[in-house]
Image: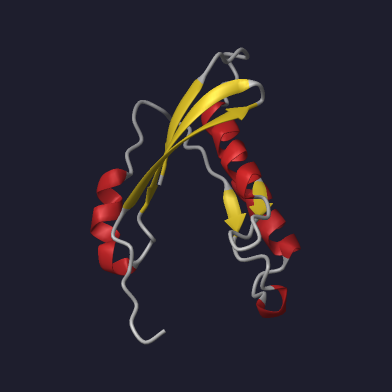
Amino acid sequence: MEKYDPTIEDFYRKEIEVDNSPCVLEILDTAGTEQFASMRDLYIKVKGSDRVPILLVGNKVDLEHQREVASVEGSGLAQIWGCPFVEASAKNRTNVNEMFAEIVREMNFNPEKKEKNYCCCTII
C-alpha cells in the first residue's frame, strides 16, 4: 500500500442469538492504533463491577506460515488470565461468530444468576 488511512472509529450494531437468547452487539472499531489511544481510552468504562470480562483472541490464524505465537502459548496465557481463548481469521471468517458469542457469554456470566433472558453489550 502506498497510502494508509487508519480507522479512527467505525460503529456497528448487530443482532445475534447466543445460547438461545437474543443479543444486540454494539461494536466500536477503534482499529487499536496508538495514534488514537487517548480516544480509545475514553470509550472503555467499567462500571460497578469487580469482574471485567476478557476474551483472548489470536488473530489472522489464516497466516499460519507467519505465526509468531503458538496455539499452546495462547491457551496457556488464557488459562493464567482465567479467560477463554479463540483463534480467528476475519479473512476466512474462521471463528468470527464464535468469538462474538464467547465474549457475550463472558459479559453475561454471573455466578449468582443462572437465568438470562436477553443481553446487550458494547464491544470495543
* In this view, 95 is above or below 100: below
Query: What residue is drawn where x is 57% and y is 26%?
Result: 109
Q: Hey, which quadrant is residue 77 in on the image?
A: bottom right
- Here the colouring is secondary structure
- Residue 22 in view: yes
* In this view, 14 is above or below 8: above
Left or right: 3 in relation to 61: left
Kindly give the residue lying farthest to the right in the view shown: 72
Query: What residue is drawn where x is 58% and y is 51%?
Result: 56
**Residue closest to the eye, 13 or 42:** 13
- Residue 83 in view: no
x, y percentage for residue 8?
A: 28, 60
Q: Hey, which quadrant is residue 120 in on the image?
A: top left
* In this view, 108 is above or below 100: above
Left or right: 18 in relation to 40: right
x, y percentage for residue 49?
A: 41, 28
Query: What residue is drawn where x is 71% and y is 79%?
Result: 65
Left or right: 52 in relation to 33: right
x, y percentage for residue 66?
A: 66, 79
Query: What residue is drawn where x is 59% and y is 31%?
Result: 105
Which quarter of the image is occupied by the N terminus? bottom left
x, y percentage for residue 53?
A: 51, 38
Left or right: 71 in relation to 123: right
**Residue closest to the eye, 108 or 62:** 62
Kindly give the residue lying farthest to the bottom in the view shown: 2
